[in-house]
Image (cartoon, helix red, strand yellow):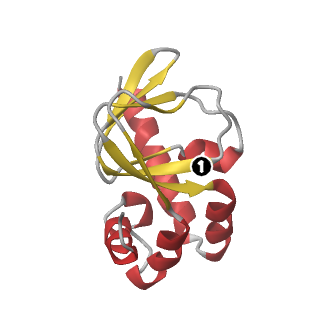
Amino acid sequence: MISTVERVLFLGGVELFVDIPSEELSGIANIAEEVELSTGQRVFAEGDPGDSMYLIVDGRVRIEVQEKTVAELGTRQCFGEMAILDNEQRSGTVTCLSDAVFLRIAQSDFLEIMMEKPELSRGIIRVLVSRLRKSNQR
């Protein structure tokens, strides 16, 4: 179990939250649910409802779109942020490449915090633009 203090320290190192002062990260730490999965377990599948985003505390995941690997992510990276913003179905399948620990943030909680903290919008835009640029370079 990750303590609130450890969650705040972790969140401070995630690109998405880089513009948020650490004293304000405790609100995000409090709404995040800890999830542990084993190697080979699926976090979610393409087409599932997009109701949350995930932050990787420990471990690695593979993201596939139409059964083609598009990314591998590790510690301090996030996924699921697109669905949390547009309320659409998941655009890919995420599978654990190792035992993993995540912080899961529900869409309703996240949107509420985004209204209070516009800096989060900038963080999400930064992450999405970075991924789009990488995709365009392929």
Q: Position of residue 20 (x, y in %)?
A: 44, 75
Q: Secondary structure at mark 1?
A: strand
In the displayed structure image, the side of residue 8 where residue 52 appears, left or right: right
Compared to 68, does 7 lie above or below? below
- Please tell me which residue lies in front, 109 or 69: 109
Q: Count of labels shown?
A: 1
Which corner quadrant holds the N terminus?
bottom left
Residue at 65% x, 50% y: name it: 85
The x and y percentages for residue 127 are 44, 50
The residue most toward the top is 67
Give the vertical position of 74 relative to 23 (above or below). Answer: above
Give the quadrant of residue 87: top right
Q: Is residue 80 left or right of residue 137?
A: right
Classify 40 as above or below 12. above
Give the residue displayed 47% in from the left and 70% down from the top.
29
Residue extending furthest toward the front:
1
Spot occupied by residue 44 in the image (x, y as percentages of width and height):
54, 33
Q: Residues within 10 Å of mark 1 (few under 14, many from 20)?
A: many
Please determine whether, in this image, residue 77 is positioned above or below residue 111: above
Q: Nearer the viewer, residue 8 or 131?
A: 8
In the image, what residue occupies the spot 37% across and 34% down?
Answer: 134
**Which residue is at 44% across, 59% downward?**
16
Image quarter of the C terminus: top left
Residue at image mark 1:
52
The amino acid at mark 1 is Ser
Q: Position of residue 61 (x, y in %)?
A: 35, 35
Of 32 and 122, nearer the camera is 32
